[in-house]
Image: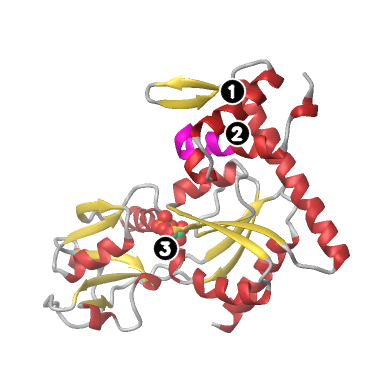
Amino acid sequence: MSRRHLTFRQLETFATVARLGSFSRAAESLHLTQPAVSIQIRQIVDVVGLPLFEQSGRDIRLTTAGQELLQTARELDDSWNRFESAVNALKGLRKGRLRVALVTTAKYFLPRMLGAFCQRYPEIDIELEVANRARIVERLRANEDDLYIMSFPPEELEVVATPFLDNPLVVVAPASLPLPPGPLSLADLAHHPFLMRETGSGTRKAVDRHLARSGLALNVKLSLGSNEAIRDLVASGMGLAILSRHVLGEKPEQDGLRIIDVAGFPLQQPWSIVHLKRKVLSLPAQAFIDELLEHAALS
Ligand code: PGA
């Protein structure tokens, strides 16, 4: 196998096809034509001497050789980032690239912190990926990003997790719903229809854990993967929900919502900045952690 002819660009194309599971989506994301992507992949296959993808129904899947190459490509990427950071440190610069993956609920506060970071380090390019917790854990396992923001750092992986901000989960109802006064128990509300986040979401995990501990079941009318949709459906009178306080505006009543005083709530599950223990953090990643900690201390 002669690796002399392999380039970083080809490996990036390969990793993009692997990540998106499609030549055409990779072409779109890389601003290339599909034949250009196919040619690059064929050039790698010629060097490796084994197929990298196999057809699985309408999708393509990595072969074992493909999985090995993906792992190697990520390690090379990590090494190069380390090298770049080392060189940048020598130059006294904070230049480079930062990839952050965050749970959907965190997108309400992160842009503010990101704004301050971008002003401080205008030469750092940032890529953000927003998905539910289950998907973020997959990305963490595959070492796809520099940093991850989530509530429940996975116990099955060796990670470093730094809690930095509260994520209170509150019970929210339509503003017009008549309710008895005073603190209620969740059992008082169990006959109301509830709109829940989908299985795989961190919010859902926190709620399910609370219900299991208190031996309660809620009347779940609908599960869906969007905080905004749940918030708006609650305001339209469809039911109650348990959502992160960050999802609601400053004044929920103005949006037709009301936070109910329920015993045991808000559920507290701080957000953490997470990365794999074996990952050597780039300078931009380290600077971003500092920024988040500093910002959180002030808020
Ligand atoms: P979610 O995650 O957006 O998937 O509900 C929230 C969290 O982990 O805090």
> Residue placed at 32% from the left, 53% from the top?
225
User: If the image is split into quadrants, where does the N terminus sit?
Assistant: top right
Mark 1 residue element? loop
Report the amino acid beneath label 3.
Thr
Return the disc, 2 or 3, that comes first in the chain's sequence.
2
Q: Nearer the viewer, residue 249 or 163?
A: 249
* Residue where numbered disc 2 is placed: 14
Vertical position of residue 263 compared to residue 105: above or below: below
Residue 247 badge:
none
Q: Tell me the mark number nearer the camera, choosing from 2 and 3.
A: 2
> Residue placed at 53% from the left, 35% from the top?
17
Report the amino acid beneath label 2.
Phe
- Residue interval drawn in magenta: 14-26
Q: Is residue 174 left or right of residue 9?
A: left
Decide if residue 257 is in sight here.
yes
Q: Is mark 2 within 8 Å of ligand 1?
A: no
Outermost residue toward the right in this view: 90
Q: Is mark 3 within 8 Å of ligand 1?
A: yes
Report the amino acid beneath label 1.
Leu
* Residue where numbered disc 3 is placed: 105
Return the disc, 2 or 1, that comes first in the chain's sequence.
2
Ligand 1, by image quadrant, is bottom left
Residue 43 percent coordinates (x, y):
66, 24
Mark 3 residue element? helix
Rounded to the nearest angstrom, the CA distance separating label 2 from label 3 is 31 Å
Return the disc, 1 or 3, that comes first in the chain's sequence.
1
- Please tell me how crowded label 2 is: few (under 14), some (14-19), or many (20+) other residues with Cα within 10 Å: many
Residue 52 badge:
1
